[in-house]
Amino acid sequence: MLELINMTTISIALMIIGAVGVVLLTKPLDKVIMVSVLEAGLFLAIATFKYLDVAFLTAMLDPLSIIVFLIALTKIYNVRKSKMEDYSTIDNLEIIKENDGELNERPFKEAR
């Protein structure tokens, strides 16, 4: 049983867990955590196969890739937020004239 637990199987397990987590999780910060798990598995696999120069480069570039990923997430969040603010300026209240002549504002979904 213990011969199955070695560095290669641990690195493969980390990469699979990270990849499945990135695909299935919906929250952006959870995706960042899963990308970190995936990168840890990749780094461990590279170090296990004794490509130490590539492992050194991976260790140097992994934090940079996480920072770029976080910057992209904040940009996407800001763009979506500004789009929602732009769409909120559109008249989303339907003004319905009642029988008595006074105007009544109801939300658009309720007016239908």
Image (cartoon, rainbow, N blue to C red):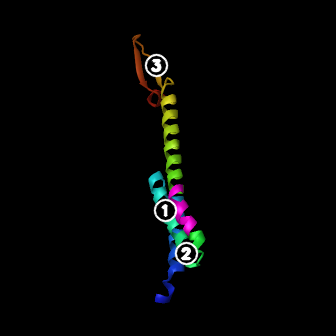
Q: Earlier along the polypeptide chain: callout 1 or callout 3?
A: 1
Depth check, mark 2 against mark 3: the one in front is: 2
51 or 36: nearer the eye?
Answer: 51
Q: CA distance from mark 2 to mark 3?
A: 66 Å
The answer to whether residue 92 is above or below residue 65 is above
Q: Residues within 10 Å of mark 1 (few under 14, many from 20)?
A: many
Q: CA distance from mark 2 to mark 1?
A: 16 Å
- Tell me the residue at 49%/56% (across/down): 31
For mark 2, give the secondary structure.
Answer: helix
Residue 95: mark in rendering: 3
In the image, the segment drawn in magenta is 56-64
Q: What amino acid is found at the position of numbered circle 2 in the picture?
A: Ala
Q: Which residue is mark 2?
A: 47
- Tell me the residue at 46%/59% (across/down): 33
Q: What amino acid is found at the position of numbered circle 3 in the picture?
A: Ile
Q: Earlier along the polypeptide chain: callout 2 or callout 1?
A: 1
